[in-house]
Image: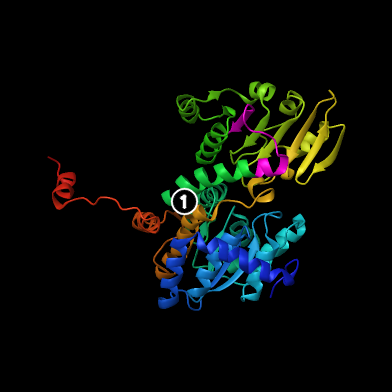
Amino acid sequence: MFKVKDATLAPQGRVAIEWAERNMPVLARIAREFRETRPLTGVRVGAVLHVTKETAVLVRALMASGADVWLAASNPLSTQDDVAAALVEEGVNVFAWRGETEEEYFWCIERVARSGPDVVIDDGGDLHVFLHERAPEIAERVVGGTEETTTGVLRLRALERAGRLRYPVIAVNDSMTKYLFDNRYGTGQSTLDGIMRATNVLIAGKVAVVAGYGWVGRGIAVRAKGLGARVVVTEVDPVRALEAVMDGFDVMPMSEAAKIGDIFITATGNIDVIRAEHVLAMKDGAILANAGHFNVEISVQEVESVAVSKRVVRSNVTEYLLPNGRRVYLLAEGRLVNLVAAEGHPSEVMDLSFANQALAVKHLVENRGKLGVGVYKLPDEIDRAIARVKLETMGIRIDSLTEKQIEYLRSWK
């Protein structure tokens, strides 16, 4: 079963997937091991992920392990239609196309949920939430799940606190080889890539306002600074704000930053970070972009309520004329700018994230019935093994502790 935009795009998609595979050697090694051991034989995997060439490499690894994979998109505008077509040709049940309406988006997720997955892979939590709210009888049979994003992990921990979580979930986002690299280096580079592709503006000399100084915000701030921007950080957490100051960035409230910023990038995971009062204070020509998972960080509804008019001026760029005569430019409809206006994270960094996903699924199946309901971290030994393999594929060697050093570290003396 499948529904994609154009099945004839499959040849183009195969080439794109091959390009990604060349730059994902850790996942390629896992796929080779899976092909030999077939640890997921008879297991149905339901996945809601950005349908990109990198995701396709993960799906191929899961299929090599014997899994039956059902896939939908975790964002209405992030699907690469040629990749979706190629996966259909390879036997994956894909329900995804770029430009889904909200109704179509949730219809696709429901197709995956109703397939009766044994293991659930999610990016943002929409599949997990659907199973818990609308298909609890299916959720009861789920062996376990994984979650890729900070936003999704927050939602799952809320389910756990409410006593409503129905199966064990591995918070892949909490793995060091995920958040230290994907969130920081992946989002940092791909967000600036999306902004530049959408606008073609020069970053150097601009004032870039980064809302949020978690790992995503740090990556964006560093990359913007590297391109010559003067970076301002806004935060609500005093510790993170202090870190930003000591990393050399200006820190101030959004109400003050709104007056001086040229480019605004949200990366908080929260709602209404940029509101109407901020937009009305902005310079003429200010650019608004979001790097958080959901399109709620920039209050598009408030922007539209105060705007005199709007028009699309470039692909992925909407101009809003304000009552004061100034114009602001919203990128990618307020959705993930790196996936809507660009191609998402580089394959090299997704190699680490999806290695975590593949091994997390294997861990859940191998420990079927042993894990209680809850949100877990992937074991540290798996995290470090992924890092070790990545270093090997890069031709980098590191030291090992001697027996004497190990004993010294263990001794209370």
Binning the other alpha carbons within 10 Å of mark 1 as few (below 14), some (14 to 19) or many (20 upward) gives many
Which amino acid type is marked by label 1?
Lys
Front-most of residues 6 and 299: 6
Q: Quadrant of residue 187?
A: top right
Percent across and percent down for residue 194 are 65, 44
The outermost residue toward the right is 309
Residue at disc 1, secondary structure = helix
**How many callouts does the rendering have?**
1
**Residue numbers of the magenta segment:** 194-212
Residue 324 in the figure: left or right of residue 268 = right
Q: Is residue 36 above or below residue 371?
A: below
Front-most of residues 412 and 66: 66
Residue 278 visible in the displayed image: yes
Q: Is residue 294 above or below residue 310?
A: below
Percent across and percent down for residue 27 are 46, 63
Question: At 50% across and 54% down in the image, what residue appears?
Answer: 348
Is residue 274 covered in magenta? Answer: no
Residue 397 in the figure: left or right of residue 31 = left
Q: Where does label 1 land, which residue?
A: 178
Is residue 199 covered in magenta? Answer: yes
Q: Is residue 405 above or below residue 110?
A: above
Question: At 46% across and 66% down in the image, what residue appears?
Answer: 28
Q: Is residue 138 above or below residue 256?
A: below
Q: Quadrant of the N terminus?
A: bottom right
Residue 400 in the figure: left or right of residue 150 = left
Percent across and percent down for residue 55 are 57, 61
Q: Quadrant of the C terminus?
A: top left
Percent across and percent down for residue 117 are 57, 70
Residue 213 visible in the displayed image: no
